[in-house]
Amino acid sequence: MSSISTASPAPLSPEDARSLQANVWRFYLFRFFVDFQLWLPIWAVYLTDFRGLSLTQLTVLDAPFWILLIVLEVPTGAIADRWGRKVSLSYGALTNAIAVIVFGIAANFGILLVSYLVWAVAWTLYSGADSAFVYDSLRANGREDDYQKLWGRTRAVSAAAAILGLLIGAPLGDFAGLWVPVVASGGLMAIAWVVTFSFKEPPRAEGEDHANYLATIKEAFGVAFGRPAVRMMMLMMAAVMGIGVSMIILQQPFLSDHDVRYGLFGFFLTPGQLLSIAGALLAYRLVNALGVSGVVMLMPLAVLATATGLGFIDHLAAFAFYPLTTLTFAMSFVVMSDYLNRRIPSANRATILSIQNMMFSLIVAGMEPLLGVIGDHWGLTVSYRTAAVLVVVIGLPLLLLWLREHNREQLPGQERAPP
């Protein structure tokens, strides 16, 4: 197992320092177009109402997507560690653009499935590589302590882009047809691909050589699972976020069941995104106030509250529980990313973050079909109650195990973020 490197990147020329500094705002622009997707408010009803899939078929269609994420997360993370974060982000955006366009014109289940699988390849190419790209760009300039705050801004940019997608995509789908926002989103993703041409590949720390491909994967697993605090954080967050995301796929069917028009979906989904902006921007302040453990503890409690509220209140007003999970997700993504980045070496960073995403995908691949089948046979309220039980049975014990390991291992400046 590799030890955590304390080496610093080699000295930079003024021109390289400026280019790496510019990586941050250029990444904001990239992230904006990645998340400015007009299909966001209508994709589930596009499949159920326009393409004729049942809720079970919808969630079963999602299962191969998440399974492929599981298979590819670590290999594509190793691509970013072996050949560069810029390369991985660029190919990911291009592949995603193609997948979204095919998804919007697919006329049968087989083509939809192919588009989903290509989409999964795209996601794995820039998941893990994205935060590693930003962290290493900051680290090269000696600004890694700013990562939590700046990654919070990235999440806020993502949420702002998603809000635009929600507010524009839903009325566009209602007016022009549910397939139109999907195809248009492919063009927006292509813009994100063009933005990657302006990126400067960040340097790795001295002594963190590019190992061969298989050695990169093996070493990353050793680092990730060799540290108990890292291992338990990854397991706990994968389980809780996996359950939470599996409930999110039920949002649009919930609104449709309560007779909400497609054109109004965006207005119901926007409050959660607004709260996520606030959560992402304020996450580092909350860490200062509550500590890392205090913020992380909010995650399973928020998902549990959302599942319980939706499971026992069969009314449109119960949709107000969803923003609670969205808010906590935004904070937890920032805190978890900073927590892991502080404990893993640059040479393994993208691969280890991909291991985290792989574990998350494994949970969702099982949870979504389960909730879909239950929803089709016994109703959405029973699906939500099932999710609540799973948070109690799986999420809360993992939280307690992480708290134990976290308290045993404290890094300087970790429990309270730097000012």
Image (cartoon, rainbow, N blue to C red):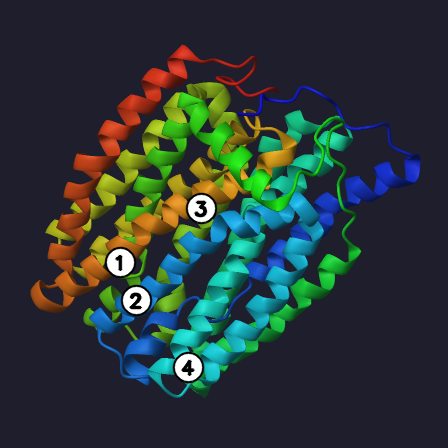
| Sequence-first tag of 3 and 1 | 3
Q: Residue at x 91, y 40 (%)?
A: 15
Q: Is residue 34 left or right of residue 273?
A: right
Please name the residue that numbered disc 2 is placed on.
252
Amino acid type of the residue that numbered disc 3 sits on in the rendered structure: Asn
Q: Dot 4 surroundings within 10 Å: few (below 14), some, or many (20 or more)?
A: some
**What's the CA distance linking mark 2 and mark 4?**
22 Å
The residue that appears at 68% across and 64% down in the rendered structure is 193
User: Around disc 3, counting alpha carbons within 10 Å, would you say few (fewer than 14), some (14 to 19), or many (20 or more)?
Assistant: many
Q: Quadrant of residue 146?
A: top right
Circles 3, 1 touching at the beta carbon (< 8 Å):
no
Q: Amino acid at mark 1?
A: Glu
Q: Are marks 3 and 4 in contact (CB under 8 Å)?
A: no
Q: Position of residue 397 (x, y in %)?
A: 23, 28
Question: In the image, which disc is placed on residue 111?
Answer: 4
**Sequence-wise first label, 3 or 4:** 4
Q: Which label's residue is closer to the chain start, 2 or 4?
A: 4
How far apart are the two marked residues, 4 and 1, measured between alpha carbons? 21 Å
Callouts 2 and 4 close, C-beta under 8 Å: no
Q: How many angstroms separate mark 3 from mark 4 (CA)?
A: 26 Å
C-alpha span from label 2 to label 3: 24 Å
Of the numbered discs in the image, which one, if any, rests on residue 357?
Answer: 3
What is the secondary structure assignment of the residue under circle 2? helix
Q: Amino acid at mark 2?
A: Gln
Q: Quick check: 242 above or below 100?
A: above
User: Residue under circle 1?
Assistant: 368
